[in-house]
Image: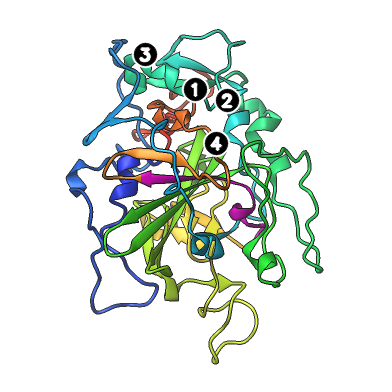
Amino acid sequence: MHPAYNLHFLGTIFPILVTLQPAAAVPTLLESRSWLSASISKWSDVFNRPQPVVGCDKPKSNKLHTDTGTFNPKEEKGPANEIPQYVLDYAPLVHLYSGEKFWPCDMAEHLEHVTPYLNYTQIRATSEHLNLTNLDELNQYSSGRFVYLTSDDNVEARPDWLGGEKNIPDTPDEDGTRRESVGNRNNPYQRPFTSPQKEEGHPILGGRSSAPAVLITVDKPNNITDAFWFFFYSYNLGNLVFNIRFGNHIGDWEHTLVRFQHGKPTHVFVSEHYFGQAYTYDAVEKAGGEKSESEGAGKGKGKGRPVVYSAVGTHAMYATPGHHPYVLPLGLLHDETDKGPLWDPALNALTYTYNPATDHLAPCTTRNPNAPTEWFAFRGHWGDRHYPLDDARQYEFAGQYHYVDGPLGP
């Protein structure tokens, strides 16, 4: 999946919410800045048709300008930059697909295998890899918008870093202990943290991945807090239509949102294909909590952590396992989800708070006070520019391309 993210998106997420069950009234929860001023999930068409090449103008500043001023992620560290405990208590659990080939990845490791290009022109030496603390330096080139973090390897050779197999979540044992993931990389920014289930004396449900998730909380009027969980993958394998694959791209960002009011979960949003979908908290599957009297053990719709599903290849997020057609009739284009490895993103996450009124973002001061923020200001793409048609890896059919542009970031 390939959404175009922007921090303003965090201030204006999903104006219309629906439930898994038919509802007589669909509530509207847009209560911040104008929807028209938000940059949110824009596609040129179903598979993100490549955009025209533009020039190489250099701006006077490398800061990210927004509708409310200049976004400076280095500002505003203080006691207010905390993640409420209820956000972690109700962190989503993610079922990855059992037959997945492209698993969650570490953004920092991804940067070790890419070189920045301005459209198709290399602008840094291959040996000069950037990192999460200086990625925003690339905004000096065409405001960063047309910078592409281009793979140093031929992606069709499927280098190991692209697949992220070592980041498959570990499997909890029956006694609640965890077996470490293969090739486990420590998160250098996160202080020790255990699963909410372990802290409450319940068995640990999901495994830890070496690939950190990204958590951003946003406080809004009426005692509302939105908790955005972002997930990064180094490769998106597009879906098949008539046995022809379209929409591959390097770099992939997905997200799930849990909305709280007065500290209680009320809604869950998932970035499924075709603009995403939102549900009431009561409607979604949950695990690790109390069940209603009419429900037995196992999954239920009582109290607990929301369970979501990541589609094979595209990683689009859904609220249920199964077959998910979109856009084309007769299920010609669809995602597939199942109950594969269960990932607990709360066990390894970079955590931040964001203030949409001031455009200030800061790391959580108790969990990862030194977590980098500069990478949020990078305005470019986390993967290659679409390959031209004279590249043997590329083809086009009916206006759709085998490889499309890498996505923008959060």
Mark 1 burial class by Cα count in 10 Å: few <14, some 14-19, many 20+ = many
Q: State which region is magenta.
A: 339-354
Mark 1 and mark 2 lie on one chain; the one further toward the N terminus is 2
Q: CA distance from mark 3 to mark 1?
A: 13 Å
Identity of the amino acid at label 4? Answer: Ala
Q: CA distance from mark 2 to mark 3?
A: 18 Å
Between circles 3 and 4, the one closer to the viewer is 4
- Name the residue carrying label 2: 111
Mark 2 and mark 3 lie on one chain; the one further toward the N terminus is 2
Give 227 or 233, whichever is nearer the viewer: 227
**The label number, if any, that marks residue 385 in the structure image:** none
For the view shown, which residue lies furthest in the bottom direction?
Answer: 293
Pointers 1 and 2 in contact (CB under 8 A)? yes
- Name the residue carrying label 4: 371
Identity of the amino acid at label 3? Answer: Tyr
Pointers 3 and 1 in contact (CB under 8 A)? no
Residue 388 percent coordinates (x, y): 43, 19
